[in-house]
Image (tube, rainbow, N blue to C red):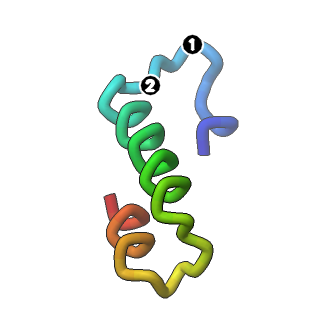
Amino acid sequence: MIGELPPTTTLPLSLIDAHVNATQVIHKQNLKDTNDKIAQTLCEE
């Protein structure tokens, strides 16, 4: 998605924070299955 944006587009800090937080949760919880409830919740955000 980001690659489709014009180069001058700035991303909202909240979007970046959500991505970083989701990545941290996935790593800490060792999530590897998209059927996991936590994984599904993170994807919905």
Is mark 2 in CB contact (under 8 Å) with mark 1? Answer: no
Vertical position of residue 21 compared to residue 5: above or below: below
Quadrant of the rendered image containing residue 31: bottom right
Mark linked to residue 19: none
Q: Nearer the viewer, residue 1 or 6?
A: 1
Position of residue 29 measured from the top left corner of the image (x, y, whole percent): 47, 63
At 38% from the left edge and 62% from the top edge, which residue is drawn? 42
Q: Amino acid at mark 1?
A: Thr
Position of residue 9 measured from the top left corner of the image (x, y, whole percent): 51, 19
Q: Is residue 3 left or right of residue 18?
A: right
Question: Label 1: few (<14), some or many (≥20) within 10 Å?
Answer: few
Q: Is residue 35 left or right of residue 40?
A: right
Q: Amino acid at mark 2?
A: Leu
Vertical position of residue 9 compared to residue 17: above or below: above
Quadrant of the rendered image containing residue 14: top left
At 50% from the left edge and 58% from the top edge, which residue is drawn? 26
For the residues labelled 2 and 1, the Cα–Cα distance comes to: 10 Å
Helix, strand, or loop for circle 2?
loop
Vertical position of residue 32 compared to residue 11: above or below: below
- The quadrant the C terminus occupies is bottom left
- Name the front one of labels 2 and 1: 2
Position of residue 16 measured from the top left corner of the image (x, y, whole percent): 43, 32
Quadrant of the rendered image containing residue 17: top left
Name the residue that disc number 1 marks.
Answer: 8
Question: Label 2: few (<14), some or many (≥20) within 10 Å?
Answer: few
Helix, strand, or loop for circle 1?
loop
Name the residue that disc number 2 marks.
Answer: 11
Q: Residue furthest right?
A: 3
At 44% from the left edge and 25% from the top edge, which residue is drawn? 11
